[in-house]
Every structure is written in structure tokens, then in C-alpha cells.
Amino acid sequence: MKIWLQEDGYTLLETLVALVLLLIVLFPFTRIMTFLLSEPKSMEKIQVINLAEREMELTLLQRNYQEETRQEMIGRKSYLLKKVIENKDRLVKIRIEVLKSSTGKVIYSVMTVRMHEIP
């Protein structure tokens, strides 16, 4: 009489090895993310990116293809938000730039190209 042994599932050792490997990969990642999110300059960069992307979304949603420059405050810091529009044939190129008010240096820029709708 033969008895068949089935080996279903994982052993305790295999499970522990998998957990150790997972921790080896995740621990540095969580340290990096914690550093990036707690670093003041990183938080400022994230806020600037959100400002530019929000402006791009509003421009596309409202189809407001007019150039403008305005001042925006994030916390105690002042930024210039500049919308640059270029028309060529049936294409419109939209570029949103966030500049540091004190230096005029571009911190972040986002751009897209859209086709004009045919009236």
C-alpha cells in the first residue's frame, strides 16, 4: 500500500525567508519616502508641482487659451504663475511655469499641445 504525501503550501522557513526579503526591499523605500515627505524643500517642490498641474487642468477644462502671469502664495513664499500660449496652425501649445518671485527663476514647468476645435 502506497501513501502519497502532498506538499501543499509553504514551510515556515520559506515564509520567514520571504518576509526577510520583503523587509530588505521595503525598509530603504520607506526611509526614502519619509525623508522626502519630511524635508521642507521636498514639500515645497510638491506644492509647486501641484500648483502648476492644477493651473494646467483649469486651463484645459475652461479652454482659457490666454496668456497671463499672476502671483501665488504657498505658505509664506511667493511665486509667479505664468501661462504661455503659442498658436500654430490648428495646434495650441500651453506651458505653465512656476517662478520664484524673488529671482524670477523657473522652478517647475509643465507643457501640453492640443488641437483647436473646428467651429
Image: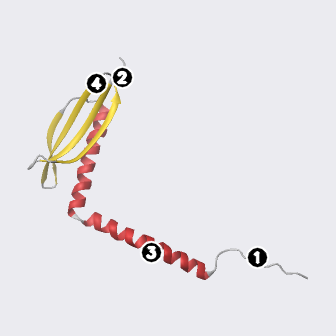
Q: Secondary structure at mark 4?
A: strand
Q: Which residue corresponds to mark 4? A: 88
Q: Amino acid at mark 3?
A: Ile
- Badges 4 and 2: C-beta atoms under 8 Å apart? no
Q: Which residue corresponds to mark 1? A: 6
Neighbourhood count class around disc 3 (C-alpha, 10 Å): few under 14, some 14–19, many 20 upward: few
Q: Amino acid at mark 2?
A: Glu
- Badges 3 and 2: C-beta atoms under 8 Å apart? no
Residue 25 drawn at (x, y percent): 44, 71
Badge 3 or badge 1: first in the primary sequence: 1
Q: Which residue corresponds to mark 3? A: 24
Residue 92 drawn at (x, y percent): 30, 28
4 vs 1, front mark: 4
Q: Which residue corresponds to mark 2? A: 117
Q: Quadrant of the C terminus?
A: top left
Badge 3 or badge 2: first in the primary sequence: 3
Badge 4 or badge 1: first in the primary sequence: 1
CA distance for labels 4 and 2: 13 Å
Coloring scheme used? secondary structure
Please tell me in which quadrant of the rendered image residue 113 appears.
Answer: top left
Task: Indicate whether 45 appears above or below 68.
Answer: below
Badge 2 or badge 1: first in the primary sequence: 1
Name the residue at the right extreme. 1
Residue 111 falls left or right of residue 28: left
Residue 99 drawn at (x, y percent): 16, 46
CA distance for labels 4 and 1: 70 Å
- Badges 4 and 1: C-beta atoms under 8 Å apart? no
